[in-house]
Amino acid sequence: MSESKKWFSLDLDLNKKSESSGTCGCGNTQESCGSSHKQEELSAEEFYEAAINASIGDERKKDGFEQVFDVQMDRRDAFKKLTASLLIGAGAVSSCTSVVQGADSKEKAQIDWEEQFKGNYKLMTDDEKKQTVDRLMRSYELRTGKNINMSSKNAEEDVLFGYAFNISKCQGYMNCVTACVEENNQDRKSQMQYIRIHEMKDGKGFNFNEADDNYYHEVPAEGHFYMGTQCFHCDNPPCVDVCPVQATWKEEDGLVVIDYDWCVGCRYCMAACPYDGRRFNWSKPEVPENEINKNQHYLGNRIRKKGVMEKCTFCVQRSRKGKNPACVEACPTGARIFGNLLDPDSTIRWVLENKKVFRLKEDLGTEPKFWYFMD
Amino acid sequence: MRQLKVIRSLVIDSLDTITKGSKKYHLWMGFLTLVMLIGMYCYSIQLDEGLSVTGMTDRVSWGLYISNFTFLVGVAAAAVMLVMPTYVLKDIDFKQAVLIGEGLAVAALIMCLAFVVADMGGPSVLWHMIPGIGVFNFPNSMLTWDVIVLNGYLFINISIPFYILYRHYQNKEAKKNIYVPGAVLSVFWAVGIHLVTAFLYQGLQARPFWNNALLGPRFLASAFAAGPALIILVLAIIRSFTAFKIPDKTIGKIAMIVTVAAQINLIMLVSELFKEFYAPTHHSESAYYLFFGLHGKNALLPWIWTAIPLNVLATVMLTFGKLRKNPRILYFCCFILFVAIWIEKGFGLIVPGFIPGPYGKIAEYLPTGIEVGVTLGIWALGAFVFTILAKTAIGIELGELRFKLKKMES
Amino acid sequence: MKNKNLIYYLMLFIVVCFYSCKQEGEYHSITDKIEADQKPYHGNLSSEELLAGTDLIQIIEGEHTFLIPERKGQIKSYACIECHSKPLNEMKGVDSQKAHWDIKINHAALETMDCATCHNPDNMNNLKSLTGKDIDYNLSYKLCAQCHSRQFEDWKGGAHGKKVAGWAPPRASMTCVNCHNPHNPGFETRWPVQFNTQKVKERKDDLGH
């Protein structure tokens, strides 16, 4: 859209007109209903005309049917419109009845509709990204009356994120886990956690089998050391290859991210991950309203839905603003180091070049960007 | 126009046949409908609550659904073992059996697709997987390969029998040069669907239990044992309940196929066990868990120790020609072989792949009631589809359904 | 006829297989990629905004130049000479308010270190090196570095300690005393802040038997 106005303000306009004419937005023809949902491909003027056509009738220029087919459609668009007419019984009925319920719920239904049939975030243009983020923010506002701030910031140039973990420093306090849960709006009910801290016995090497990742006693425990794992943001991520719908991919700055709205929930990526880096929403995630972190990113900590994958994103909502991920900031011992691998002056690069670093399961060829080292 | 008329008449006729039948038939269909309804109810709960109502967790993220899916791909692929000799090697012996086999393949494939859909977290956005509208991650994701081969195989297996039956319905011979290329293609395709499904697991470096080169061949061998075994059982039932004639010779030949495949399967099993237990590595832990339990966790022991003896027993008994020729023993062997492979390739393959987890943690898996309900519902769906297909096909093959006859009557 | 078809299908299959071969990356490993693409970062992101509220001073140690938090302004009773107006010896026994009574040194053995190892009784406004040279309170890391040279090396490079704000340049690192109490530098044992009861259920629930 040429205007920076959010799309729904226009839509509200439509709703008022429809109400005054005594029919709903899709009263004329089924197809025109489809078109009124699909403004993102129309310019503001075109849309305004479509809206008038849909609401007061066909005399002014063309009927709703022609109006729709005059608009250039790509395939996805055509499908959306087709479905719009096919599912008119189910989807549109609810939006039609909302004339009684008021403009808000109608708008809500239309946002839902748009969201259901939007494309893959990875393939969106920056404008489309902005639109979907705007819709999601508006939807949250309509539902809860509160505002969130969601970003669709792309990867910065000349940045490749990397992470180093100092095994000798970690004391197992788990401040990182708490910070991560709070920052990333993880499901409190199932106690989802991206980070695991493994308590290992001295003298047994890195023996994960005998390690405990759910200890509860005073730490650091005598004769033990601690090792944290999370998503390693592999440079050659097996999870990305196996996804049948490209709902997960590696961004330019090396973050492996998920489009929660595109994920179909087959959990193939979970089976493919050798590092236990991925989590699934087995039921609807629950976060108390007052605990929600409202500083969100589309690919990061926005509220997930049931039946989709999620994972650590190195706190994309923070790291793309120059901040450190929440775990790094929360660590009381400085065991976690985060930075730009491409910058030779960065501290992470100093660690890689001057400490004896290693990665887990390097033989699998996944090239994790998460290194371990000791003092 | 005429074609349309014929098809219309065929549909009406088949609807007529499938709604009429003996009391037993009605009971059977009623029972299947009931189970399907229960399955649908369970699925509606799963849709509402999310997959948390199943026994699956982040640790064991695939369970009963994917197990059954894997097994049924094998059953579907097995239809080819009958197609090949009949259409390509011109061995007319199998002709009747082939129609049944292909019907079975169709039913199995429908069940496969249903199981995959049941396993999805977001079935409402499954259109993301449709090429063109959604984003199809071909060729990187083996799952997209699987979608292609399964749907392609479904298409082949619907169109070939349909063509033959359609011709027979009009009292015409089916033209060889039309269906033989399709049959040849389906031979390769059947091997393809099973290999691709094996690759689905085999390609995951994260799961050493699956990541071995033998998985694909073993899938094929076990499929060609379990699939024809099921076909023998189905043929036996059809033989005793309908007028459809299936000569002993046909069943004998299929039994031969089952025997050879079961033997090969057993050899591969031994090879696999040798590799896992002669020089056990860190990667053998899954096999240890499956066969002996690990750290006191042993939920799979009863299953696998049912499957292995049954498998061995069936294979040994089938190996002796005398025993094999006794129908009762043959049916018994086929049944236990089918059960054994169902366990081995379903539960015994999928679940231990996840145990222990990437960091050695063990969380066991047992399906919940809802999961079992959905699974039974889908099996009932398969049986339902197969019964309809078989009844129509048998009607046409027996000459009870004929286009011209009907015309003359009216 | 049949053979031709067969060959055609086989060809198609092979073509698909080749097409599906994973594209080999330009680089053999992530380290190759880093080496090939590296350049000093002068992008849009900067930590300056995040650091705006903190008083920082720039230090140059060897090849490393970075910021550390200013210290003197954080010490409540600085400048010390406001009380320590004369050398400590002369102040002893003087009838004045007691100060620093709560400080207990728990840092190395007593024969190695006492108050005077770091503090100069004659000049309280500065710290004192082992050789008796003055060290500014803002640069207290120099004092620590006298013994903890390995930690000092790591800290300079960025392997030891925490950043003040984000990863983006300019680099601002916490200094020793921002995390360690110089009089009691060790970390206490304590309980973890998190315990996952759901995980216990998942693993030990025995599946409802």
Image: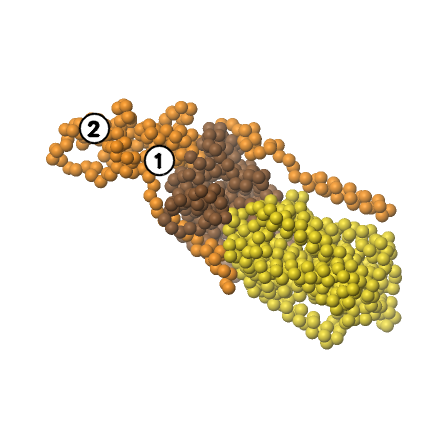
The chain whose colour is brown is A
Give the quadrant of the N terminus of chain A.
top right
- In the displayed structure, does residue B11 sit left or right of residue A148? right
Colour of chain C in the image: orange
Colouring method of the image: by chain
Q: Is residue B164 left or right of residue A124?
A: right
Is residue B91 left or right of B74 when viewed as pictured? Answer: right
Secondary structure under the numbered disc 1 in the rendered image: loop
Residue behind mark 1: C53
The residue under label 2 is C121
Q: Position of residue B10 (x, y in %)?
A: 80, 65
Given residues C176 and A152, the one toward you in this image is: C176
Q: Chain of mark 1?
A: C
Disc 2: host chain: C
Q: Residue at x 63, y 51 (%)?
A: B273
Q: How far apart, in angstroms, are the residues tagged by discs 2 and 1?
A: 34 Å
Percent across and percent down for residue A362 are 55, 39
Rendered residue at 37%/29% (across/down): C149
Q: Which chain is yellow?
A: B
Label 2 in the same subunit as label 1: yes
Name the amino acid type tagged 1: Gly
Q: As shown in the figure, which amino acid type bears the numbered disc 2?
A: Pro
Q: Quadrant of residue B370?
A: bottom right
* Of residues A97 and A129, the one drawn nearer to the viewer in this rendering: A129
Q: Mark 2: few, some, or many residues within 10 Å (few <14, many ≥20)?
A: some
- Locate residue B172, reporting x and y percent: 88, 61
Q: Nearer the viewer, residue C7 or A250?
A: C7
Q: Position of residue C26 (x, y in %)?
A: 62, 32
Q: Are marks 2 and 1 in contact (CB under 8 Å)?
A: no
